[in-house]
Amino acid sequence: MAEFNLRITRGGSVTINEREYSFTRLLDDGRMVFEDAENGRIKVLSDDDFVSLYASDRLSVKDWKRLPVAHSDVANRALESLPPEATTKAEWRHAYCVAFDARPGLLKNEPCLTALIDEVAAEKGHAKKPNWKNF
């Protein structure tokens, strides 16, 4: 089973195969339930189904602005106003995002993302690297 860190809350907007859905709940067995925004039809996805659709660019999460409460207090603050350790972490994460954005069409799979992560870590001198699954 695939592992990933999905930061979406109930009601979060997702596009699956060019249709808008909202995330409604997580079932006890780990499957995710989405509701079609237009007709209310339910779509249930396993972790593996979700990752497969995402990796093939057939699924995108539109509503990343719904942050966990622990992060919402700093989300609207200027980077310079954060404590030094938070600034360092933000700059660390930013380096990987910029590298990914600079390569449109890069596949979202383990070999491609691992190679990108290794390249950025070597270039920036990062001893710690993000896991490709929650990159």
Image: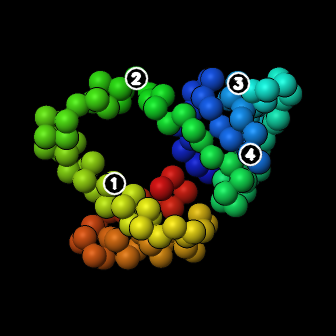
Q: What residue type is labelled 4?
A: Glu
First along the sequence among labels 2 and 4? 4
Nearer to us in this view, 66 or 70: 66
Q: Which numbered marker is on residue 93?
A: 1
Judge whether 135 appears above or below 122 on screen. above
**SS for dot 4:** loop
Closer to the eye: label 4 or 1: 4
Q: What residue type is labelled 3?
A: Thr
Picture quarter containing residue 75?
Answer: top left
Q: What residue type is labelled 2?
A: Val
Circles 2 and 4: CB atoms closer than 8 Å: no
Q: Mark 4 points at which residue?
A: 18
- Measure the C-alpha gap from mark 4 to mark 1: 29 Å
Image coords of residue 47 (percent x, y): 71, 46
- Measure the C-alpha gap from mark 2 to mark 1: 20 Å
First along the sequence among labels 4 and 3? 4
Q: Which numbered marker is on residue 24?
A: 3
**SS for dot 3:** strand
Q: Which colour scheme is used?
A: rainbow
Look at 84% across and 29% down and name the residue there.
42
Image coords of residue 109 (percent x, y): 61, 66
Badge 1 local density, few (<14 within 10 Å), some, or many (20+)?
some
First along the sequence among labels 4 and 1? 4
